[in-house]
Image: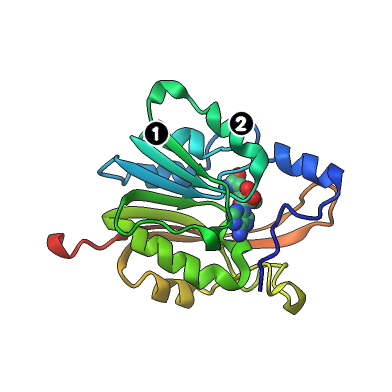
């Protein structure tokens, strides 16, 4: 089954709104908090940085190399314009998360803000790959939607994924969980009716068996 791409088959007005989403906004506090825990700054990965590159702009300043994965093609020009003075080597993988094949044990930092929940039935496979791609001691920060999120219904089961605190703890069994905080509030997006947004904000450090 092909996951429905969030950016496909959308009316032009909605597409324009999507492309301006997050534009000019400062990085999410979660990304900044997680970056403070990172000890080695060779290589980072962000899944779903588009369209505003809010967090990528902060991440790129701290690493020698940054890999970005997003199915949205229009972001390539913005990625090319990321601060060149940082000298970071930036690679853009314009593909779906389930198509991306990261090398194992290479990243010091992996970040995914409000992007992994869009991977539907591929969620477990994708999170497995990114866990493997982190080196021991590496930092993972991400948001995961909870089962009480308003978009959790049977007809969208192939689009979105939701995990309970217990399921997340199990997925992160090889990590020291630094933060798992519930972000639950009524939100509005554009002219759509308001809805209950419910996510865990997570920061976790991959356990290094050599240093324990
Ligand atoms: C809601 S936006 C979040 C953007 C950004 N992280 C932020 O918080 O401002 C989700 C991003 O993930 C990308 N995305 C969603 N599902 C994807 C998938 N299965 N494969 C690749 N990219 C995907 C979308 O194109 C979009 O850029």
Q: Nearer the viewer, residue 201 or 67?
A: 67
**Residue lying furthest top in this view?**
85
Res 77 visible: yes
Label 2 close to label 1 by CB (< 8 Å): no
**Residue that appears at 84% across and 57% down:** 193
Choose top left, top right, bottom left or bottom right for residue 41: top left
**Residue that appears at 39% across and 55% down:** 140
Which quadrant is home to the N terminus?
bottom right
> Tag on residue 131?
none
Residue 100 placement, left or right of 154: left
Q: Is residue 42 above or below residue 103?
A: above
Q: Which of the marked residues, 2 or 1, is nearer the chain's N terminus? A: 2
Q: Secondary structure at mark 2?
A: helix
User: In x, y percent, where is residue 71?
Assistant: 62, 51
User: In x, y percent, where is residue 157?
Assistant: 69, 75
Mark 2 crowd level (few <14, some 14–19, many ≥20, 10 Å Cα): few
């Amino acid at each position: 089954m092909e996951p429905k791409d969030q950016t496909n088959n959308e009316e032009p007005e909605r597409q324009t709104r999507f492309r301006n989403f997050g534009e000019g906004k400062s990085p999410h506090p979660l990304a900044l908090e997680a970056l403070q825990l990172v000890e080695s700054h060779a290589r980072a990965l962000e899944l779903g940085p588009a369209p505003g590159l809010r967090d990528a702009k902060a991440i790129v300043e701290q690493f020698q190399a940054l890999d970005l994965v997003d199915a949205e093609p229009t972001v390539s020009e913005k990625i090319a314009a990321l601060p060149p003075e940082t000298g970071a080597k930036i690679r853009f993988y314009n593909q779906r998360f389930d198509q991306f094949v990261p090398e194992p044990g290479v990243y010091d930092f992996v970040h995914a803000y409000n992007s992994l929940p869009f991977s539907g039935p591929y969620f477990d496979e994708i999170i497995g790959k990114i866990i493997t791609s982190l080196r021991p001691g590496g930092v993972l920060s991400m948001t995961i939607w909870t089962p009480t999120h308003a978009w959790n219904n049977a007809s969208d089961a192939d689009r979105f994924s939701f995990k309970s605190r217990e399921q997340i703890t199990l997925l992160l069994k090889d990590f020291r969980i630094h933060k798992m905080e519930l972000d639950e509030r009524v939100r509005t997006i554009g002219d759509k009716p308001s809805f209950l947004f419910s996510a865990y904000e997570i920061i976790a450090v991959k356990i290094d068996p050599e240093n324990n």
